[in-house]
Image: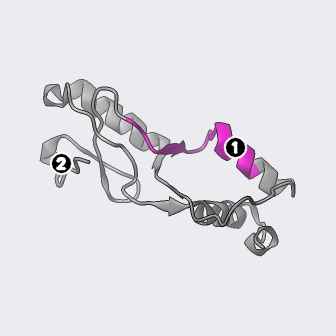
């Protein structure tokens, strides 16, 4: 994984203070933001509606990226000819467990995380 160390390399400042760069065909971590979709939306709904059933120990790991950081990274590609032909893994630079993600969702929605763990 190629990780830029400064803005001069064509990277954008992330919401969490890290740096993000994207190249042609770049993979993203799971995207989150104000209009979350897909599995994370379903997960949040199941937590709020008391329908969540945990499977496994919750220690599986994910990378995440905020939707605004995806936009910043895309703009960088359009404005950085040197990025052409390179592939970067675009994320917030951290690894999150499913338990951490569920805990954050519970905290934000006023749910008690302890209700969902064995």
| Separation (CA) of disc 1 from disc 2 | 33 Å
In the picture, measured across the screen, residue 82 lies left or right of residue 94, that is left
The quarter of the picture where residue 34 lies is top right
In the picture, measured across the screen, residue 56 lies left or right of residue 62, that is right
Q: Nearer the viewer, residue 82 or 69?
A: 82
Q: Nearer the viewer, residue 60 or 68?
A: 60
Q: How is the image coloured?
A: one colour
Residue 101 among those drawn in magenta: no
Name the residue that disc number 1 marks. 41
Looking at the picture, does residue 95 appear above or below residue 44? below
In the picture, measured across the screen, residue 33 lies left or right of residue 113, that is left
Residue 28 in picture, x, y percent from top left: 42, 39
Residue 71 in picture, x, y percent from top left: 40, 35
Which numbered disc, 1 or 2, marks the residue closer to the eye? Answer: 1
Residue at point 34% right, 59% down? 17
Q: Which mark is residue 80?
A: none
Residue 11 in picture, x, y percent from top left: 23, 44
Name the residue that disc number 2 marks. 7
Residue 114 in picture, x, y percent from top left: 76, 75
Looking at the picture, does residue 118 appear above or below residue 47? below
Residue at point 32% right, 57% down? 18
Callout 1 crowding tier (Cα within 10 Å): few <14, some 14–19, many ≥20:
few
Extent of the magenta region: 27-44
């Amino acid at each position: 994984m190629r990780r830029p160390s400064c803005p001069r390399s064509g990277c954008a400042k992330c919401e969490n203070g890290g740096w993000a760069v994207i190249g042609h065909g770049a993979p993203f971590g799971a995207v989150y933001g104000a209009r979350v979709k897909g599995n994370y939306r379903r997960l949040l709904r199941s937590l709020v509606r008391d329908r969540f059933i945990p499977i496994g120990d919750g220690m599986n790991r994910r990378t995440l990226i905020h939707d605004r950081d995806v936009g910043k990274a895309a703009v960088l590609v359009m404005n950085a000819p040197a990025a052409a032909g390179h592939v970067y893994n675009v994320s917030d630079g951290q690894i999150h467990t499913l338990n951490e993600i569920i805990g954050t969702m519970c905290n934000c929605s006023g749910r008690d995380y302890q209700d969902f763990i064995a």
